[in-house]
Amino acid sequence: MTAHLARVQPSCLQGPREIGVNFVACQLFALLAALWFRLYLHPAKSSSAVRHAFATILGTYFVIFCFGWYSVHLFVLVLMCYGIMVTASVSSIHRYTFFVAMGYLTICHISRIYIFHYGVLTTDFSGVKPSFLEYLSYLLNFMSVIAGPCNHFKDYVAFIEGRHTHMKLLEVNGKHKDFHSLPEPSPTGAVMHKLCVTLVSLLLFLTLTKTFPVTCLAEDWFVQKADFPTRLCYLYVVMQASKPKYYFAWTLADAVNNAAGFGFSGMDKDGRCCWDLLSNLNIWKIETATSFKMYLENWNIQTAAWLKCVCYERVPWCPTVLTFILSALWHGVYPGYYFTFLTGVLITLAARAVRNNCRHHFLSSKALKCVYDLVTWAVTQLAVSYTVAPFVMLAAEPALSLYTSMYFYLHIISLLIILFLPIKPQAHLQRQPQTANSVNKKKID
């Protein structure tokens, strides 16, 4: 929790306007550095202190190179959180860190609006007590300081100390007594696959995203002249065209970590090595999602896990609403974020009600199930496009103009569903603070 709040990530991940040259240069250099790190600073050849120091120094340089003087905010926030960790009681660390980091984060977001005026942003503030070197290495390492993803401290330290892959293999086969003699899994195949995905995403970004810019949603022909079906279809196309930059940034970040030997998650049922421990999205499941829930479970996975741990699992009432609000605050203070996340609350609750009341009627035959899946896929994709448009538009005026031109149709439908469909009470779960590693096994409902 502490680490994710203290982590700063580039704007290309949270409402990016474009993929910056500095970001691409740093990530490509990080990929080469990760390969060198795995080969020449392998745990068998170097001490943990050397690996921590190298990762921290190079990561610090990346931050300064990308963000210049604005990187001071990252260092201040990191040091503030560490001060709390070494002075506060164990039972209170999470509370103090949460409020201090979120407060600093919000102040920086507000100041950024007045400085940049909705323009291209340069920084996004998001992201047994460790030693100071371990703490700095965890937050500032060159593999994830620029684009993430968020990862667990336990996994990161195990990676630095050379226990990462063996620890995951032991989790898969706990009865194997000689697991240290097992060969170290190679990430080469996973890295090459993810680099191919990255290249395709970049090509799509350079073509589709430039051809269908989000700014066209605020143009007069769309808002006033196009008919409703045309607006629906064009909105879907524009939102599809906005995805490749996220696919590019997150997949490249995942590949960088894998190239360094970090991200092994165990073996699948066929005995093949899996390198998806740090994956932040599942593109196939996103594009084929048949429910709003399924879509959210496979988008920005690591942040969703963090939100579930710090909010959804802990608050005693309205967990869905409060989790969406916290997510909006974490992203920033642009009005578009709040349009998106508050709309998301309505759609999540409405989708849950529809699924609980209707889905079982379509499970009696494969044909009915196929029809249900096809319809829910189309509805999900249109709903997501409608919901996330303000997120990439940022400002209130174009977001309101868009929703007005769409007659607020999904807001109205969602409200009617919530009001008139019976909502089946969910089994009450005693919400208790979760361990960090337990979060990845659960998804936000």
Image (cartoon, helix red, strand yellow):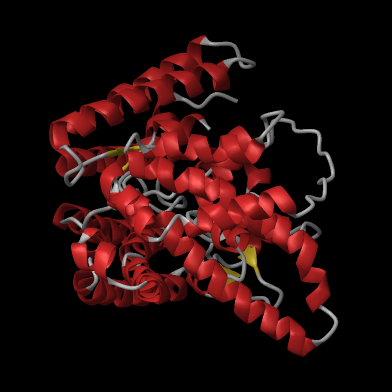
Q: Name the spot of residue 383 as percent of width and height, x first.
A: 50, 63
Residue 315 lies, with reference to residue 438, above or below; the image says above
Q: Residue at x 65, y 50 (%)?
A: 349
Q: Name the spot of residue 206 as percent of width and height, x first.
A: 20, 73
Q: Name the spot of residue 116 as percent of width and height, x first.
A: 15, 37
Toward the bottom, the furthest residue is: 367
Tell me: 408 left or right of 350.
Answer: left
Can residue 395 be seen from the camera position used here?
no
Residue 361 lies, with reference to residue 325, above or below; the image says below
Residue 223: quarter of image: bottom left
**Total numbered labels placed on residues in the image:** 0
Residue 125: quarter of image: top left
Q: Residue at x 77, y 67 (%)?
A: 358
Q: Residue at x 75, y 89 (%)?
A: 367
Is 41 in front, or is 252?
Answer: 252
Is 332 in front, or is 6?
Answer: 332
Is 24 in front, or is 62?
Answer: 24
